[in-house]
Image (cartoon, helix red, strand yellow):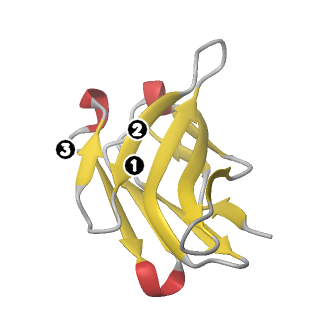
């Protein structure tokens, strides 16, 4: 069984930094795209950043230049480095990954979420 576990959330002042981690474990053949989403209270979940298995990245406009997504394929882990944090970045952050358990079978997996709170 495949699991995604996020870590690294917390409380930080505006202008500060946090680094989130998302570790995949279990029976993994290959991981394609890995993504970070976030959901603020009363709002829909939104895509924040994507990284392909080849290392190509994409970002939501409001985080461009402040957030950096990366991955360590040997560790089946993705990271989200968040700098210059703003109160509007406050949300639960979720990791998502498209994981193959064999060459033919793949499924989207979600982590449990990690809270990020930015105080003004």
x, y percent for residue 21: 54, 65
The number of numbered badges drawn on the structure is: 3
Q: Is residue 89 toward the left or the right of residue 114 in the image?
A: left
Q: CA distance from mark 2 to mark 1?
A: 18 Å
Splitting the image into 4 quarters, where does residue 52 fall?
Answer: bottom left
Q: Which residue is mark 1?
A: 16
Q: Is residue 10 visible?
A: yes
Q: Which residue is mark 3?
A: 65
Q: CA distance from mark 3 to mark 1?
A: 14 Å
Closer to the eye: label 2 or 1? 2
Q: Which mark is residue 48?
A: 2
Splitting the image into 4 quarters, where does residue 58 fall?
Answer: top left
Query: Residue visible at 49% across and 68% down?
Result: 31
In terms of secondary structure, where does tag 2 sit?
Answer: strand
In terms of secondary structure, where does tag 3 sit?
Answer: loop
Compared with residue 38, is residue 97 higher up or lower down, i.e. above or below?
below
In terms of depth relative to the viewer, which is nearer, 64 or 52? 52
Q: CA distance from mark 3 to mark 2?
A: 12 Å
x, y percent for residue 120: 47, 28
Choose the circle earlier in sequence order: 2 or 1. 1
């Amino acid at each position: 069984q495949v699991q995604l576990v996020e870590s690294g959330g917390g409380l930080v002042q505006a202008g500060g930094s946090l680094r989130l981690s998302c570790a995949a474990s279990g029976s993994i053949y290959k991981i394609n795209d890995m993504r970070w989403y976030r959901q603020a209270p009363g709002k829909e979940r939104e895509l924040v950043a994507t990284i392909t298995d080849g290392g190509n990245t994409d970002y939501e406009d409001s985080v461009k230049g402040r957030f950096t997504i990366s991955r360590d394929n040997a560790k089946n882990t993705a990271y989200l480095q968040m700098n210059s944090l703003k109160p509007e970045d406050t949300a639960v952050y979720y990791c998502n990954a498209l994981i193959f358990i064999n060459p033919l079978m793949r499924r989207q997996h979600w982590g449990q979420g990690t809270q990020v709170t930015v105080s003004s």
